[in-house]
Each structure stands twice: as structure tokens, then as C-alpha cells.
Amino acid sequence: MSNEIGQALSVSIRELPTIFVAYTHCHVDQAAGNFSDQIRDGFQNVKDWVMQKGHDLSGLKVIGVPHIRDSQLTGYECCVELPKTEDVNTGTIQTKQLTGGKYAVLTLEKDSATIGETIGRFFADYMPAHQLIIDNHRPSYEIYDEHLMDFCVPIS
């Protein structure tokens, strides 16, 4: 399945639960070049920390929270769901809640060549065509599976 221009987007409207996560923040410097290694290392650090705490990663969600300013990625939170609330601040690893509620969820293949274009069509075409309004009080986030990702946008 490819995400060619014009292909229908796979979008559902869902009530998502509040998720408690451990995370680390990666500052992204677009001018520095390839920041995907930094993000990959961030995810590995959080996964290692969660496993050191005795949690089994197999049933936990891996989540990314992009920070966008002026259409540019400026930061990224690498998160792993925690099965219970823990108040942690180790300097690198912290914990917080991702607030639940009503979300438009775009499901797409984890293909770096098409993700940007597909998300762009979602915002430019799907959101206005379906009269969806972003709730700017909650963050958008990405939930990763082995081959797919859910791009979750809070709506009012």
C-alpha cells in the first residue's frame, strides 16, 4: 500500500484515553542536518530506562510528540507508555500525562518518503473538508507500531 497523491487517507475519529508516559526531549536543529539519529537515540534511552524499571516493553505504546514552530520541527519528545503513574525527573528522563479526548487519527505506513506528504494532505485537505478544528490545548502525537503509525490530532 503506497500513499500516492490522491489516495484516500485512512482517518478515524476516536476518544483516546489519557496516557502516562516516560519521555526525553530532543532539541532538533534543522541546520545541523540529520536529526533522526538523535531521535532514535532518545527513544532507545527511554526504552532502556523503562526496562530498567522492570516493565515489559511488548505491551507498551511507543509515542512521539513533535514540536512544530513556523512549519519547522524544533523538538521531539520520545515517549514510552508507563503501566502506572510514577513521578520521575532524572534530568534526562521525565514523566507526564498526554491528555485524552477526541482525536482525528490518521493511520499510515512508517515510510519516511511519504509521511510528510501524507500528513500535509491530512491538514490541507482532510481537516477542512471535514470541518475539523484543532484543539491547541492538547498536543498532537504519533503512536508507533512495527509497520504503521497513528498520527493523532486533538480536535474540539
Image (cartoon, rainbow, N blue to C red):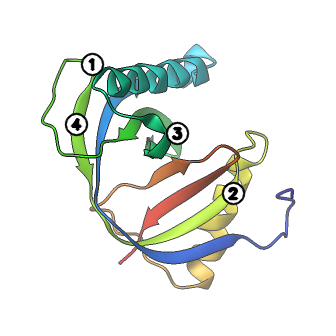
**Which quadrant of the view contains residue 124?**
bottom right
Can you name the residue that lies furthest to the top here? 32
C-alpha span from label 2 to label 1: 30 Å
Q: Which residue is mark 4?
A: 95
Q: Which residue is mark 3?
A: 72
**Amino acid type of the residue that numbered disc 3 sits on in the rendered structure:** Gln
Q: Nearer the viewer, mark 3 or mark 1?
A: 1
Q: Residues within 10 Å of mark 2 (few under 14, many from 20)?
A: many
Q: Which residue is mark 1?
A: 92
Q: Which residue is mark 2?
A: 108
Contact (Cβ within 8 Å) of mark 2 with mark 1: no
Sequence-wise first label, 3 or 2: 3
Q: Residue at point 72% right, 70% down?
A: 9
Contact (Cβ within 8 Å) of mark 4 with mark 1: no
Q: Secondary structure at mark 4?
A: strand
- x then y, percent, for residue 29: 49, 21
127, 151: nearer the viewer:
151
Above or below: residue 40 compared with residue 68: above
Contact (Cβ within 8 Å) of mark 3 with mark 4: no
Contact (Cβ within 8 Å) of mark 3 with mark 1: no
**Amino acid type of the residue that numbered disc 2 sits on in the rendered structure:** Leu
Q: Is residue 134 visible?
A: yes
Q: Is residue 28 visible?
A: no
Sequence-wise first label, 3 or 1: 3
